Image (spheres, rainbow, N blue to C red):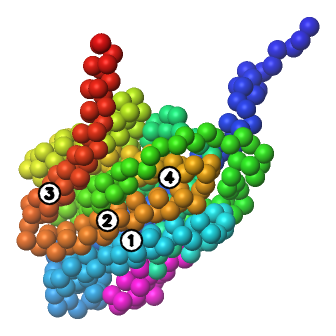
Amino acid sequence: KMRSLAPGIKLITSFSRDSWYRFFILILTFVFYTTYHLSRKPISIVKSQLHRNCSNVIHPADLNITDNDTWCDWAPFDKNNYQNLFGVLDNCFLVAYAIGMFFSGMFGERLPLRYYLSSGMILSGLFTVLFGLGFYWQIHSLWYYCLVQALNGLVQTTGWPAVVACVGNWFGKGKRGFIMGIWNSHTSVGNILGSLIAGVYVSSSWGLSFIVPGIIIASAGVICFLFLVEKPEDVNCTLPQHHVRSLTGVVEFSLCLLFAKLVSYTFLYWLPLYIANVAHFDPKEAGDLSTLFDVGGIVGGILAGLISDYSGGRATTCCAMLIIAAPMLFLYNKIGQNGLPTTIGMLLWCGALVNGPYALITTAVSADLGTHECLRGNSRALSTVTAIIDGTGSIGAAIGPLLAGLISPTGWNNVFYMLIAADVLACLLLSRLVYKEVRGWCGYTTRQRG
């Protein structure tokens, strides 16, 4: 008589070798991109430590204080123009990132993805650590921090096109939105982990808020070098099915992403400071609260993927979420500070509605448009389309925090009006595609009735 297999082994063997490899690649790429975001988040948490109200801080007896308000601040951020300087820091990273993104796709096409990704992660770790060492080396030059941020911005562009090209090689079309929705939570998971890790050290020695994430992403780079499989055929797995789709909508989706990322990145870089300023939390609490925006973002991304898979309407899903997001942002600014439960609720809602469309466009849409190539599994085309869409988006990512830095001294209200305007523009840019999708559905239903 046959002995029955152990249930655990039954489970393992019920999945094919292909499925295990796919699962392994998804997990790997998820971890890699999580570390990319984990290492770019600390700056937003540390900002409220580099400049804070020092009159409440107990000062050491041996210190002769001339300025009661700024003695504990980290020069050069101790002056009144500190918000502009923070804006400059963000922009050194983001402008380099936006410029780099247009070239990154081309390099990603020509170099083996495994080397490209692992070297990018190790270099990114190096520059993140260098920023943190400014604390230990007592560096007070804005130029140093800007240079390190810019170099980090350049090497961070290795991540996205390479990771998407790799996943595109392994996964066909089908229910892409849902899988990608779950997978795309790496952005938010990275932001959350980055905020929490930075928060642990921010008040005692903020240098470690950068050094620890830097070591983490560099270690991930080593893992990438050791384990990443670029294409299914490298390990004799079957190739996924890529269906041919017409390449419409690249321009609209790219421009829509520009405005969606403008909103998303402004939150990413300024939310902890906004919470600290307006609701008077200390840097660590403000940082921890700001992660709720990303928790909402995870849910929003998965929901957007599910809805668009079910309805077949990518543009309509994005547009609907953006339409609801505008009044939500307005409400958050008006009532978001009325007690902790309100803050938490509003942050989750705003996160879901702002990040949902952004997640859907970056992953599912760029993968859809990219795998259109009649040349099956042409990862070159995919990393280029991804880089074009994300590069255009990155311009928004650069403009948003810069504008916030310029506008916030005139009052936070105006920052929110700018965000709402960007949201509405993102929506309008998709109107042609939405019209097409809706017409398709209407045509489809009338035919069915007949």
Q: Residues within 10 Å of mark 3 (few under 14, many from 20)?
A: some
Q: How many angstroms separate mark 3 from mark 2 (CA)?
A: 15 Å
Disc nearest the viewer among 4 and 2: 4
User: Left or right: where does residue 227 sit relative to residue 95?
Assistant: right
Mark before the other along the chain sequence, 3 or 2: 2
Which element carries disc 4, helix, strand or loop?
helix
Amino acid type assigned to the residue bearing label 2 in the image: Ala
Residue 92, located in which quarter of the rendered image? bottom left
Q: How many angstroms separate mark 3 from mark 1 (CA)?
A: 22 Å
Q: How many angstroms separate mark 4 from mark 2 (CA)?
A: 22 Å
Residue 98 badge:
1
Mark before the other along the chain sequence, 1 or 4: 1
Q: Is residue 137 magenta?
A: yes
Which element carries disc 2, helix, strand or loop?
helix
Q: Is residue 16 magenta?
A: no
Quadrant occupied by the N terminus? top right
Query: For the magenta stretch, what is the residue range?
Result: 124-150
Q: Which residue position is annotated with label 3?
A: 421
Q: Residues within 10 Å of mark 2 (few under 14, many from 20)?
A: many
Mark before the other along the chain sequence, 1 or 2: 1
Q: Residues within 10 Å of mark 1 (few under 14, many from 20)?
A: many
Residue farthest to the right, as pictured: 1
